[in-house]
Image (cartoon, rainbow, N blue to C red):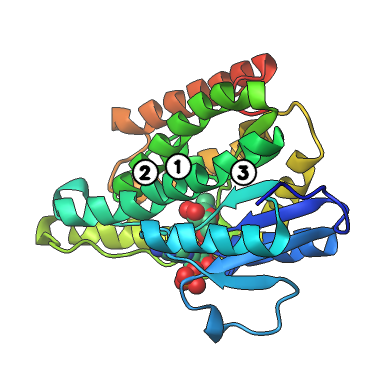
């Protein structure tokens, strides 16, 4: 099928994975009201009603599901201008407590899921010679706290892929951005490890209780969603800086509290100062990449 002109929906056609709740739902709603024709996805779209966008079935862990969803959008809308890779979940627990299967499942959704959808959409965007891909990473794509290391490593991987992809796609006028929220108030639920170890119980519970509290008190999902609209209209911008650097102070407090929750004491244990140093290096690196426009365009 040929590529349709941008036409009746002024801003074009957007595909948002994981649009049944949280950041994905807020992003899909905001884009729909901003003039996009929006296709959101869910593994159980029939369970959702009343949203101002079309919901299509998609499981990012399945090649067949991804191809059928992308084909159905292409058949209905003729093009895809914006892809927001948002579907994801956090695998919790100490590294040792997670089986290889736990880690594979985490990467299957958070990393390979993004690859499947991106690779299905790219031939369309390359034919159009235009497009934007926004990958929803996390602050934990920059720093890996204890007991969320599996999740953080999946977001680190996503950041690496995004950085390379951005350069590969520039000749085709396809732009790649990263969004790195800190805590957002959503129904984000951590998946527990399949082989819990009693020695880690107290520290794991403390960290996860703290993370749950952070999500409950987190920024509105619509604030995160705003970034997708901004990026779509911006030709040169560092996504990382937008979400994380203005929140450097609260984030530093978060990391310190996390370290304390894990049993480290600020004045006695080098880890707390290591966190601090690591955090400021991360900030400096982010600013540096921002200044050079490396992270996202
Ligand atoms: N909330 C936070 O504090 C926070 C912070 C940083 C980054 N993030 C990132 O933001 C993104 C969205 O999280 P959220 O907080 O909005 O969580 P959420 O409310 O739990 O939403 C997650 C969405 O992902 C979808 N999903 C999960 N597994 C899927 C799969 N295998 N295939 C297709 N869809 C799948 C779910 O859809 P169905 O269940 O309907 O299929 C749901 O719509 C994630 O990538 C997360 O890592 C969140």
Q: Percent x, y for residue 117?
A: 49, 50
Q: Is residue 180 above or below residue 238?
A: below
Q: In the rendered image, which quarter is residue 65 located in? A: bottom left
Q: Are marks 3 and 1 in contact (CB under 8 Å)?
A: no
Answer few, some or many: residues within 10 Å of disc 2's Cα (few below 14, many 20 plus, some between 14 and 19). Answer: many
Could you say whether the residue bearing mark 2 is in a helix, strand or loop? Answer: helix
Sequence-wise first label, 3 or 1 = 3
Q: Is mark 1 within 8 Å of ligand 1?
A: yes
Answer few, some or many: residues within 10 Å of disc 1's Cα (few below 14, many 20 plus, some between 14 and 19). Answer: some
Could you say whether the residue bearing mark 3 is in a helix, strand or loop? Answer: helix
Q: Which residue is mark 3?
A: 124
Sequence-wise first label, 3 or 2 = 3
Instruction: Using the rendered image of the protein, determine whether residue 39 is visible from the camera's viewpoint.
Output: yes
Q: Which residue is mark 2?
A: 154
Considering depth in this image, is 292 or 18 the residue closer to the camera? Answer: 18
Q: Is residue 166 left or right of residue 261?
A: right
Q: Which residue is mark 1?
A: 140
Q: Residue at x 64, y 40 (%)?
A: 125
Q: Nearer the viewer, mark 3 or mark 2?
A: 3
Could you say whether the residue bearing mark 1 is in a helix, strand or loop? Answer: helix
Sequence-wise first label, 2 or 1 = 1
Q: Residue at x 65, y 21 (%)?
A: 171
Q: How many marks?
A: 3
Residue 217's label in the rendered image is none
Instruction: Using the rendered image of the protein, determine whether residue 98 is visible from the camera's viewpoint.
Output: no
Q: Nearer the viewer, mark 3 or mark 1?
A: 3
Q: Residue at x 68, y 65 (%)?
A: 76
Considering depth in this image, is 182 or 47 the residue closer to the camera? Answer: 47
Q: In the rendered image, which quarter is residue 208 located in? A: bottom left
Which quadrant: the C terminus? Answer: top right
């Amino acid at each position: 099928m040929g590529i349709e002109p941008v036409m009746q929906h002024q801003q074009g056609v957007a595909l948002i994975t994981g649009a049944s709740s949280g950041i994905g739902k807020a992003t899909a709603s905001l884009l729909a009201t901003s003039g996009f024709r929006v296709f959101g996805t869910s593994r159980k779209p029939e369970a959702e009603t009343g949203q101002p966008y079309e919901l299509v079935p998609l499981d990012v862990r399945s090649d067949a599901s991804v191809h059928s969803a992308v084909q159905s959008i292409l058949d209905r809308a003729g093009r895809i201008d914006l892809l927001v890779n948002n579907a994801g979940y956090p695998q919790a627990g100490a590294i040792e407590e997670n089986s290889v299967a736990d880690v594979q499942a985490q990467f299957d959704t958070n990393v390979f899921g993004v690859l499947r959808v991106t690779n299905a959409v790219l031939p369309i965007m390359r034919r159009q010679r235009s497009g934007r891909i926004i990958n929803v990473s996390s602050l934990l794509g920059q720093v890996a706290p204890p007991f969320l290391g599996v999740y953080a490593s999946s977001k680190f991987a996503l950041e690496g892929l995004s950085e390379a992809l951005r350069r590969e796609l520039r000749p085709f006028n396809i732009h790649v951005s990263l969004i790195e929220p800190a805590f957002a108030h959503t129904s984000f639920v951590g998946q527990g490890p399949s082989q819990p170890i009693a020695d880690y119980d107290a520290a794991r519970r403390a960290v996860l209780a703290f993370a749950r509290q952070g999500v409950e008190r987190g920024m509105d999902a619509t604030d995160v969603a705003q970034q997708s609209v901004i990026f779509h209209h911006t030709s040169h911008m560092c996504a990382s800086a937008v979400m994380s650097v203005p929140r450097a102070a609260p984030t530093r407090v978060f990391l310190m509290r996390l370290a304390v929750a894990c049993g480290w004491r600020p004045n006695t244990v080098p880890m707390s100062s290591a966190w601090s140093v690591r955090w400021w290096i991360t900030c400096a690196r982010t600013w540096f990449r921002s200044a050079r426009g490396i992270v996202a365009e």
